[in-house]
Image (cartoon, rainbow, N blue to C red):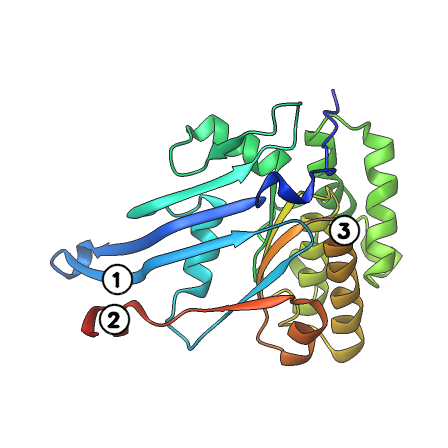
Amino acid sequence: MDESIDMSFAADDGPMLRARGIAKTFVLHTQGGASLSALSGVDLDVSRGECVALVGPSGAGKSTLLRCLFGNYLVSEGSIEVRDPIGSERRYVSLTRASPHEVMRIRRDIIGYVSQFLRVIPRVPTLDLVAEPLIARGIDGDDARERARAWLARLNIPERLWHLAPATFSGGEQQRVNIARGLIAEHPVLLLDEPTASLDASNRAVVAEVIAEARGRGAAIVGIFHDETARAQVATRCLELVPASTLACA
């Protein structure tokens, strides 16, 4: 069954995503249990229609923060909550305290993620790969694949490739498939890790356009955009991160 997602939150309903005091420390078990602090005391609110660009030097924890917001990394300290768009309660759900089953539900219905690299099941055709997030929501397979065709065409993936697995595609083609898969379900919250990194100028422009459209429909977006032109096109504000080691020495 396709559960409809209500994107009509009023402006005073609060942010779609809120993080408080996020810290992440990695324990290096292969190096005698040494610890490496990647994030310390990060706060973030993201409302509908915002695109917050994470900026800072290499090692500041930008990708680590995205992975914490998606639940790939368990935070060492702090809390992450997302607003649940399904049903009438419009409650916040905790990502940091959620069970694995609830995390999967949050990813299916609330948080979309576009990673730097496409990770796919071998031999699954591109069309089915892009349609899968909609099918997981209960949308009819034919309808889902029709929408996938529209996304692949919009992102300039040649039709001759749609029925092939993307493992042998170029880096830019794989990244555009990744973007189509990440954006097709129109999640209320989107996390984007360098979505334009492997693209030429014309395809960067197309991707910036679809990200801006997602923001226009009310998505709350957090992204890493090393391309300054793309960042200027899509970001409404920036959050600067500094290396946690710098904070520790302060």
Residue occupying the point 63% across, 60% down? 51
Any part of residue 74 in sight: no
Q: The residue tagged with tag 2: helix, strand or loop?
A: helix
Q: Mark 1 highlights which residue? A: 37
Q: Dot 2 surroundings within 10 Å: few (below 14), some, or many (20 or more)?
A: some
Question: Which numbered dot is residue 164?
Answer: 3
User: Rounded to the nearest whole Å, what is the CA distance between mark 2 and mark 3?
Assistant: 45 Å
Residue occupying the point 33% across, 71% down? 243
Query: Would you say the residues marked 1 and 2 are in contact, meaning their CB atoms lie under 8 Å apart?
Result: yes
Q: Is residue 77 rendered to the left or right of residue 173? A: left
Query: Would you say the residues marked 2 and 3 are in contact, meaning their CB atoms lie under 8 Å apart?
Result: no
Q: Residue 226 in the image: state x and y as whole percent.
A: 57, 75
Decide which of tag 1 and tag 2 comes sooner along the chain: 1
Decide which of tag 3 and tag 1 comes sooner along the chain: 1
Question: Which numbered dot is residue 245?
Answer: 2
Quadrant of the rendered structure where residue 179 is? Answer: bottom right
Three-letter amino acid code of the residue under disc 1: Ser
Screen quadrant of the C terminus: bottom left
Q: Residue furthest front?
A: 12
